[in-house]
Image (spheres, coloured by chain):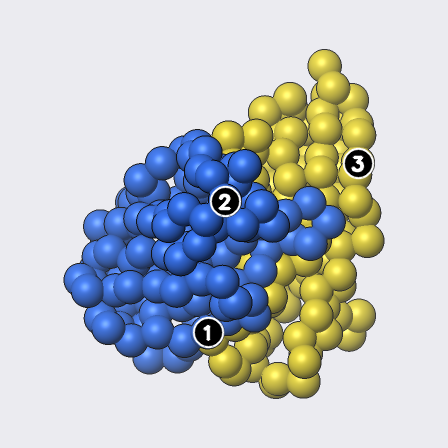
Chain colours: A yellow, B blue
Amino acid sequence: AQKVTQAQTEISVVEKEDVTLDCVYETRDTTYYLFWYKQPPSGELVFLIRRNSFDEQNEISGRYSWNFQKSTSSFNFTITASQVVDSAVYFCALRGSNYKLTFGKGTLLTVNP
Amino acid sequence: DVKVTQSSRYLVKRTGEKVFLECVQDMDHENMFWYRQDPGLGLRLIYFSYDVKMKEKGDIPEGYSVSREKKERFSLILESASTNQTSMYLCASSLWNGAVYQETQYFGPGTRLLVL
């Protein structure tokens, strides 16, 4: 069985702070993919990143960075110098060897001016 | 860019009504999905389709059916709407590229359904 845990239900920061969203996963598959999605108040889930289980290199895209560590089954997401527009619910998701995409419960990030 | 559209952003229906939620994607994706999203429960898969006229049940198919007559269109049907089907419904699509776990699902804007 697959499981994704986002232990942080809500996080509130002040603009320009750095913030890390945690994601821990469980799977028996040796090959799998991990995803992060952003859901702003408008409701649409926006795809941010996909990583496969064989690539543990950290990824950086502008103010966003991702830290994938198989040893701890974690795929954490850091926003540097947060902005009000980063306010959203962020979902981590896992897909293994079947069709199913398993989502975490999401973390509501509020960035205050 | 991938474009997934849903027929309505907001919908209000009465208990017992038959409800159709439509989803259209313009990227020639083979796979399409319907999820519902509820506070505290996250996203749950209702049905998915991997080809025209093909469908598979997800985690919570009870009370729902689907139709995929054309590749670009995937419909979710509530045969007799009930108040516990009040929810946010999200459609997604993905490309089949030879390995199921590689696919990235792209989502539509969602339909907020209220059943009175």
Residue tagged by mark 2?
B15
Q: Is residue B104 above or below residue B56?
A: above
Q: Nearer the viewer, residue B13 or A96?
A: B13
Quadrant of the image containing the N terminus of chain A: bottom right
User: From the viewer's perspective, is the residue at label 2 or at label 3 nearer?
Assistant: 2
The alpha-carbon separation of the residues under discs 2 and 3 comes to: 37 Å
Query: Which residue is outermost to the left?
Result: B70
Task: Report crowding for label 1: few under 14, some 14 to 19, many 20 or more residues within 10 A (C-alpha).
Answer: some
Task: Report the chain holding disc 2.
Answer: B
The alpha-carbon separation of the residues under discs 1 and 2 comes to: 24 Å
Residue at x 79% of width, y 39% of height: A10
User: From the viewer's perspective, is the residue at label 1 or at label 2 nearer?
Assistant: 2
Residue at x 68% of width, y 58% of height: A104
Please give left or right for residue B79 compared with residue B61 in the image: left
Residue tagged by mark 3?
A11
Task: Report crowding for label 3: few under 14, some 14 to 19, many 20 or more residues within 10 A (C-alpha).
Answer: some
User: From the viewer's perspective, is the residue at label 1 or at label 3 nearer?
Assistant: 1
Residue at x 46% of width, y 49% of height: B16
- Residue kind at label 2, given as amino acid type: Thr
